[in-house]
Amino acid sequence: MSPISRLATTKAAAPRVTPITRADCEVSCPELDVAVSAVRAAGAHGARMTGGAFGGSAIALVDATATRAVMDAVEEAFAKYDYAPPMFLLATASAGARPILESSTEMEQS
């Protein structure tokens, strides 16, 4: 699947996830709902909450050129509701997990 096809699939699926998680699992909170709504409105390809059992976070798929605008949108939305300022962790998409050692023999030698 091409990167563009994967992006389209991710973008199509992301809006369905947070409402399901919020309604069925009751693990969201107003701050996460506001963050997800703000990033979507600011042009993110997709956004959802994650880690609800551990306090939760919002994760968004955003073009690098839109990062600052999306962050600004979340900060403005949080200020509107008098929430504490949000924290951001920027990451770059990369290849998935894979073995770093080829065989058990290599493990024994290291």
Image (cartoon, rainbow, N blue to C red):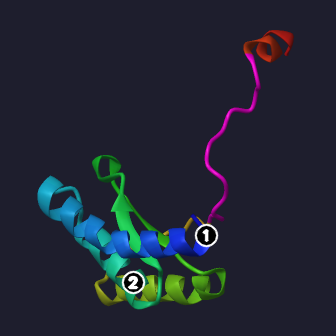
Q: Do the residues labelled 2 and 1 touch (CB within 8 Å)?
A: no
Camera sees residue 100: yes
Residue depicted at x 53% and y 72%: 5
User: Which residue corresponds to the image point at 40% horizontal and 72% vertical from the top-left?
Assistant: 47
Question: Which of the 4 image quarters holds residue 40?
Answer: bottom left
Q: Mark 2 points at which residue?
A: 40
Q: Nearer the viewer, mark 2 or mark 1?
A: 1
User: For the residue carrying disc 1, how many other residues have a C-alpha within 10 Å: few (<14), some (14-19), or many (20+)?
Assistant: few
Asked whether, in this view, residue 61 is left or right of residue 55, the answer is right
Q: Is residue 11 above or below residue 98?
A: below
Quadrant for the N terminus, please.
bottom right
Depth check: 56 or 41 in front? 41
57 relative position to 109: left or right: left
Tell me the quadrant of the picture where the C terminus can be found.
top right
Q: Is residue 99 left or right of residue 10?
A: right
Cα gap from disc 2 to disc 1, whole angstroms: 20 Å
Label 2: which secondary element: helix
Provide residue 11's location: percent of width, then percent of height: 43, 75
Mark 1 element type = helix
Quarter location, residue 92: bottom right
Which residue is pictured at 55% across the width and 90% down the height?
A: 69
Would you say 90 lies left or right of 47 here? right
Magenta span has 47?
no
Q: Residues within 10 Å of mark 2 (few under 14, many from 20)?
A: many
Q: Earlier in the sequence, mark 2 or mark 1?
A: 1
| Residue 65, horizontal then vertical, whole percent | 65, 87
Q: Give the range drawn in magenta.
A: 91-103
Q: Which quarter of the figure has residue 36?
A: bottom left
Judge whether residue 97 is colored magenta: yes
Asked if 36 appears above or below 50 in the picture, the reply is below
Can residue 83 be seen here? The reply is no
